Amino acid sequence: MVFITFRLFSRCGLPLSYFVQLAVAWTGIAIVFDYLFIVLLFHSAAYYQPDVLVYYAVTFLVPVCTGWYLQEHRPA
């Protein structure tokens, strides 16, 4: 996931705000689809364990950290 994100956006020159919006969108999609297709479909109310919350945090942090890194290391 990190490699794909870095590879896709390394040459774009996008602002950090774009990466934050991307992170919110990816995390929102993950939460909504997990809820719809795991919790509701399989009646798995105990789905939200700490490992799933870590997954959501990683889903948010990967684009944000990638954007921050690209901002800091952009050639002049």
Image (spheres, grey):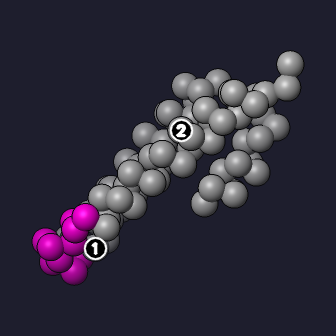
Q: Residue 43 magenta-drawn?
A: yes
Q: Is residue 29 left or right of residue 12?
A: left
Quick one: which residue is furthest to the bottom in this view?
A: 42
Q: Position of residue 21 (x, y in %)?
A: 49, 33
| Disc 2, SS | helix
Badge 2: how crowded within 10 Å, few (<14), some, or many (20+)?
A: many
Residue 50's image quarter? bottom left
Q: Write the start and end of the magenta stretch as one range.
A: 41-50
| Disc 1, SS | helix
Q: Residue 5 magenta-drawn?
A: no
Q: Is residue 23 left or right of residue 32?
A: right
- Report, in whole angstroms, how far the alpha carbon at label 2 lies from the one at label 1: 27 Å
> Which labelled disc corresponds to residue 64?
2
Regarding residue 37, the answer to whether it shows in the image is: yes
Q: Dominant secondary structure of the magenta stretch?
A: helix
Residue 45's image quarter? bottom left
46 versus 30 height, above or below: below
Of the residues shown, which amino acid type is indicated by label 2?
Val
Q: Position of residue 1 (x, y in %)?
A: 60, 60
Q: Position of residue 17 (x, y in %)?
A: 55, 25
- For the C terminus, the image quarter is top right
Regarding residue 29, the answer to whether it shows in the image is: no
Of the residues shown, which amino acid type is indicated by label 1?
Ile
38 versus 57 height, above or below: below
Which one is earlier in the sequence, the residue at label 2 or at label 1? 1
Q: Is residue 7 left or right of residue 44?
A: right
Q: Position of residue 29 (x, y in %)?
A: 41, 53
> Which labelled disc corresponds to residue 38?
1
- At a point 77% along the width and 41% down the height, the residue shown is 10
Badge 1: how crowded within 10 Å, few (<14), some, or many (20+)?
A: some
17 versus 30 height, above or below: above
